[in-house]
Amino acid sequence: MHKSTGPALYDLSHPQYPHGPHHPSPVPEKRSRPTMTASLPAFAGRTYVFRADNGAAFRNSYSADGTRLRWEGLGESAGQWEDVRLHVAEVAPEIYFISWTEQSGITVSHVMDLNALTVRAFWTFEGEGGRVGQLHTGTLERVA
């Protein structure tokens, strides 16, 4: 399996791809890798209670650099927790696409809107008939 070092992005206006990403020029130009100077995500170092529309609730504590999440189940999920590595992209001011994979194989993706304190979540898990996906909405309450 190929391990990706980051997202595969194509700048279709770049001369290397005059006909799109599937038709690169025969001799790609050599370029240095760009330097990333992204600022910290607005959720970095904060803790929120996330309440989903299915009744699930989680205490989500984000690392100071915004690269990790420790989630803790609340209510029926009390006692469950995990520390996960995050993939993060700010898609609009204070709106973030965040995803992670848990040790169990569950995958979770959030669009977290810190302006409205809402989340749209999609998670997948292994069910009896194969992989199952669920789409949910929820609210955030900043607690720390």
Image: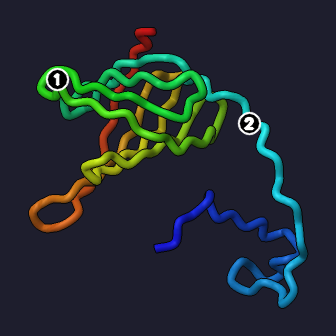
- The residue where tag 2 is placed is 38
Q: Secondary structure at mark 1?
A: loop
Q: Quadrant of residue 142?
A: top left
Task: Name the kind of residue labelled 1 in the image.
Answer: Ala
| Location of residue 65 with respect to 24 vertically, above or below | above
Q: Position of residue 82 (x, y in %)?
A: 31, 34
- Tell me how the rendering is colored: rainbow
**Residue 57, labelled with which disc?**
none
Q: Quadrant of the C terminus?
A: top left
Left or right: 103 as drawn, with respect to 21: left
Viewer-closest of 100 and 133 = 100
- The residue where tag 1 is placed is 78
Viewer-closest of 3 and 8 = 3
Determine the residue positioned at 48% across, 33% down. 68
Task: Name the kind of residue labelled 2 in the image.
Answer: Ala
| Location of residue 28 with respect to 37 vertically, above or below | below
